[in-house]
Amino acid sequence: MKRLKSTHKSTAPRKQRIIQAALRCFTEKGYIETSISDVCAMSGTSVGSLYHHFKSKEQLAAAVYLAGIRNYQTGLIEEVQKRPAPEEGIYAIVRFHLEWVRDNSDWARFLMQYRHAGFMDSTEHKFAELNDEFNSVVADWFRANVQSGAFRTMPPALYFCIVLGPCQEYTRLYLSHGYSDIEKAIEVIASAALRAILT
């Protein structure tokens, strides 16, 4: 029993190590050029061990994508839930997004580049579940501020467009052209968003 428990405890860190190694390989060589052997060498994992966790390179790539989405969404939800004040919350959302992209640029680039890749087909249901949970939590925060009279009333999707839309566009510029003044971007985007939605 102790051996089984120990093995179970080591499974999650091993999978995470493989996912991080795969992300690095995909970043350095590209998804198509990366082989399972490359990921094994990068992660210090045997081929048999990797295939125990991931049945194919496609499944591994989908896991990398979902891990990135989960990491981003979990962090942003935490920021929203601990900042109920409207102005502070908007700044926190914008700051988290842009700093996450800066600190996780490989993941951010992978998420943008491979959203519609073929390997995502098998994970659409899980991807939709993550998005539904994320959208529900963030929408509840916006709704609470509408009910308090802080935010203008508008279709829920527009709050996401106004606040996160510019963040996503800046992300594309940052990743492709090297725009790097994150602090200035946070101030400008958050201020513009507040002017658009505050009553």
Image (tube, rainbow, N blue to C red):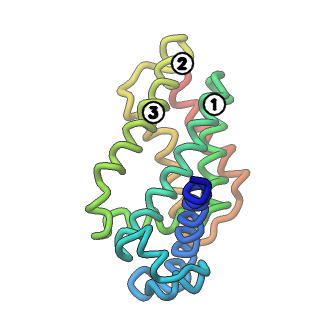
Q: Quadrant of residue 7?
A: bottom right
Q: Nearer the viewer, residue 172 or 110?
A: 110
Q: Residues within 10 Å of mark 2 (few under 14, many from 20)?
A: some
> In the orientation shown, which residue stands out farthest toward the front?
1
The dot on residue 89 is: 1
Judge depth for marks 1 and 3 and give the one in front.
Answer: 1
Circle 2 sits in a helix, a strand or a loop, which is it?
A: helix
Q: Earlier in the sequence, mark 2 or mark 3?
A: 2
Looking at the image, which residue is at 60% across and 44% down?
75
Compute the Cα span from label 2 to label 3.
11 Å
The reply to whether the C-beta atoms of the residues labelled 1 and 2 are less than 8 Å apart is yes
CA–CA distance in space, label 1 to label 3:
13 Å
Q: Splitting the image into 4 quarters, where does residue 188 fall?
A: top right
Q: CA distance from mark 1 to mark 2?
A: 10 Å
- Mark 1 vs mark 2: which is more N-terminal? 1
Which quarter shows the C terminus? top right
Figure check: 172 above or below 30:
above
Classify mark 1: residues with Cα within 10 Å, few (<14), some (14-19) or many (20+): some
Residue carrying label 3: 159
The percent position of residue 181, horizontal first and vertical second, equals 71, 59
Which residue matches tag 2? Answer: 145
Q: Closer to the camera, 80 or 58?
A: 58
Q: Quadrant of residue 80?
A: top right
Instruction: From the top left corner, tell me how far across and down residue 10 is, in percent.
Output: 60, 61
Q: Relative to 160, is 156 above or below?
A: above
Residue at image location 56% in from the left, 51% down from the top: 71
For the point 65% across and 61% down, the residue is 102
Q: Earlier in the sequence, mark 1 or mark 3?
A: 1
Q: Amino acid at mark 3?
A: Tyr
Check if mark 1's residue and mark 3's residue have beta carbons within 8 Å. no
Q: Amino acid at mark 2?
A: Asn
- Determine contact: label 2, label 3, CB under 8 Å: no
